Amino acid sequence: MSQPAISLHRVSRWYGQIIGLNDVTFDLPPGLTALLGPNGAGKSTLLKLITGQLKPTTGSLSVLGQDPFANPRVARNLGYCPEIDNFYEELTGRQFVRLLGAMHGFVGSELTRRVSDSIEQVGMTDRCDRKLGGYSKGMRQRIKVAQAILHDPQVIVLDEPLNGLDPVGRHEMVDTMQRWAEAGKCVLVSSHVLYEVEQITDRILVIYKGRLLAQGSVEGIRSQIDQHPHHIRLVCDQPRKLASALIGRTSVLSARVLEGLVEVETSQPDAFYNELPALVLEGGFSIERFDSPDNNLEAVFHYLVKS
Amino acid sequence: MPFLAVLLSTLREAAQPRRLAVTFFLVFLPAIIGLGWKLIAGAERFDAPEIYNTLAAVLVFGFILTILSVLYGTGALSQEIEGRTIVYLLTRPMPRWQILLAKFAGAWVAITVTVCLSLLLLGVAIFGGKLPSAFFQDLRILPLGALAYAGLFLMVATLLTRPLIFGLFFAFLWESWVPLLPGGFARLSIMAYLRTLAPHLKETAETTGAEEGQQNAVSLLTSFTPTEIPASHAWITLVGIIVATVTLAMVFFSTREYAPREEGG
Amino acid sequence: MSIPNTPSSGIADLTYRNYDGPMRTRAARFWTVALSVIRTNLKKPGFWIVGSLILLVYFVVGLLFFFTRNVTANARGAGAAISYPVAAQLGIQWTMFLLFIATLFVGSGSISADNKANALLVYLGKPLTKLDYLLGKWVGVFTLLASLTLLPSLVLYLFFLTSYYSDGFLKEQPLLGWRMLLSSLVGPMINSSLIVGISAYNKSPRTTGAIYAGFYLVLQALMGAGGFLFFRNALLDEDASVKADTRPAVRAATVQRLSVPGVVEGVSMSILKVQPKDLVIGGPTRFRDRVKAPEALPLALLGLGFVIVPLALARTKINAVEVVKG
């Protein structure tokens, strides 16, 4: 795809005096991207803008090169799984998906096939003929996803898709989303649960109080947060000796000795890792293991939000 | 085909057991009252045209048509918005105006079938097998009235968050009282135009005994349109109302935002 | 700590909660719910709009009273003026539909919105019984509706008192204040009970409003038509027979009022001691005199039924958890 699937340029959205989204710009290529932010950050506003339910107050956005607001051409290639838990309760799951599929213009055996395939993809084949009013939260979530993918869209937008799913269901859903991404679709998933996002993808958009704080991979974002040095923990046999050897290095800002380990602060993690093997051999240290407690999404998120 | 899917879905909602029960009740109501009237009045006092005119004017046109138009006309959209299922409609590859038109068509069919059946049963209850020309006149006017009222309430539903209250206000306060005001105020009422096209609904029949009391009672019920409106004006105005309200409704629905509010984020 | 009135339902059972501190009285519990209903609805512009319209109608009634009493009394004689109770009754009757609209605004979502949001689980998980919850909702809706009828009645009464005190208003109508107070409460009591009862059975405020409107208007149309039929027959029978028998006309007047607005009208007429003929302003005298007052007892009993039955049904319906079949 030559152009990004979803493109926002300086988009803001006001609700009266309240800013829902504040000057957001990004381009999303095909692949799986997670939209991360706490409640009230503006995730749903962003998704509603992308799916054509809302218009931006300022700025412009395009989905597949077109303005999505009330645009059937965009809707033809876009699948949306909303967060809201409302349905036509008197219909069965199959009837619900079939109705929405009919609104896409599918008829007859084509419609039947697509309905069956999408229901099967979400694992609801054996339960789709019960009324929606009697579904559990997880079942309702699956049916919502089924209606979003029935027409094999190029862009799939999912708002909190793992809500209400059991661990097996979550695993299956994550696998499914990754398969869509591998097939070349642009999949945008929103969540406020950090460990969930870590399971889903490495590509994130971090949004907070209506602002886009960061875009990219977790590592890439982490490496750009200069004012927050990396912490690296080294479990070794001679922590004090190791600490005094490290402290002289220019890549090390500080070294702290703890029970059986050394915790190092560095603003140049790459340089540090390059120097470490030679230093260890020189000093004859025995390193049992090392890790970086803040090279994860939670730490990245907290750094971004605090700054 | 998508249009048909939405239309059939709207009709399916109208056929829900709860709604169907109400529909049946309204279909039979005028006929039951007509038969009751026959029973209470007795053979010598039973004037079929007078009773038909009164019940058709007051119950079928003045009540069943209006209340169904309010409920279905506003409900075509506001039920989706309040139920927060509008998001599924708005994210389909159907032009919004088409979605609304399909919902409107479904509402109109539901209203028209109910009021026409109601009128038919009333006619059969009062006249038996020989239905007069006035009945067929009413049968032609009712769908037009349903279009006009439902179109108006649909337009209101695209603009207001609580269109049901406006609808009840209009149907049972405005339509009852405005035509009685002096001057040309009747021209602000849809019912005035409908009664122009079915003038027998304004007639008072000859009575036997208690003339003054009966005339006052009957004329009280049928004196809704003191202003004379030519039939051609009535046709043009009603068609104009239908076209204008439905068009405006489609324009508003296509350009305004109807996203349901989320619980959290 | 002993808890009085422990109900049989596990959800509403207060005894297992590990709280040993002081508990507020039952009145405080239901009043908390009522206060929340009141606060929510005071923020709605629709409530204030309807309230203003009701005040406007009472203003018109006051003007009418003033006009007939002061301006036409000399021209046509004292009989042309409307009396104080008749003015009060006209105020109630002419604002009946507005009260109906206000009931829709205020009461449609009273319980149905909680059903929709599954908030009953939260409410009944607190030290709150079903009765507290239901009473709170009813008191909240009733208070709001009563404020819309009591306040304008009070303003009208004060107008009478201040303008006609020297004409012997208090001597002529010593109990009118209490009668107006009582009659103003009939409508809010019936409307609030019906809407709260219907609301308990629905998950959508809109559906609640539609059902309540349907019940209100259909019953009014049905009984109005029935009453008209009986009345017409009664008039014709009166004309045809030698001896005047007013019982059919009374029966007709009663049947005509076997609906929500009819009961409110009939009961308030009894309280204010107003005759139907006094309410026909203008028109031929012969017809006016033939309209009889309804029987108060059937209307009062029906009114009581409108209050008790919906609330009793609502109490059985209110549950923390809903079991969905199929």
Image: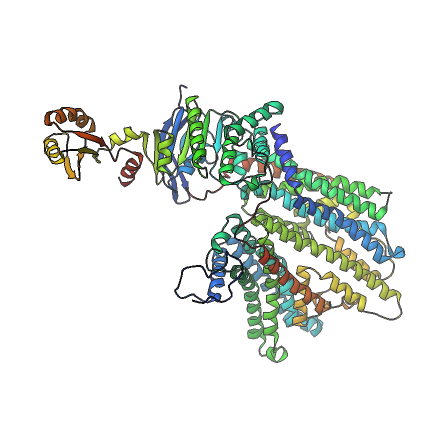
Residue A232 relative to residue B186: left or right: left
Classify C131 as above or below A119. below
On the image, the x and y values in percent for residue B189 come to 67, 47
Which one is in front, B234 or A185?
A185
Q: Is residue B71 above or below residue C179?
A: above
Instruction: Give the residue displayed 68% in from the left and 53% down from the top.
Output: B176
| On screen, residue A187 above or below B252 | above
- Measured from the top left, where is residue C267 in percent x and y? 67, 67
Is residue A278 in sight in this rendering? yes
Question: Can you tell which quarter of the image residue A228 is in?
Answer: top left
Horizontal and vertical percent position of residue A64: 44, 24
Question: In the rendered view, does C5 fall on the left or right side of C259?
Answer: left
The mark tally for this picture is 0
Which one is nearer the viewer's eye here, A208 or B51?
A208
Asked whether residue B189 appears in the rendered view, the answer is no
**Along the line of sight, which residue is nearer the eye, A302 or B246?**
A302
Task: Please report the residue visible at 63 percent of the width from the left and 51 percent of the height from the top.
Answer: C211
Q: Nearer the viewer, residue B22 or A6?
A: B22
Tell me: residue A153, above or below residue B157: above
Outermost residue, top direction?
A: A2
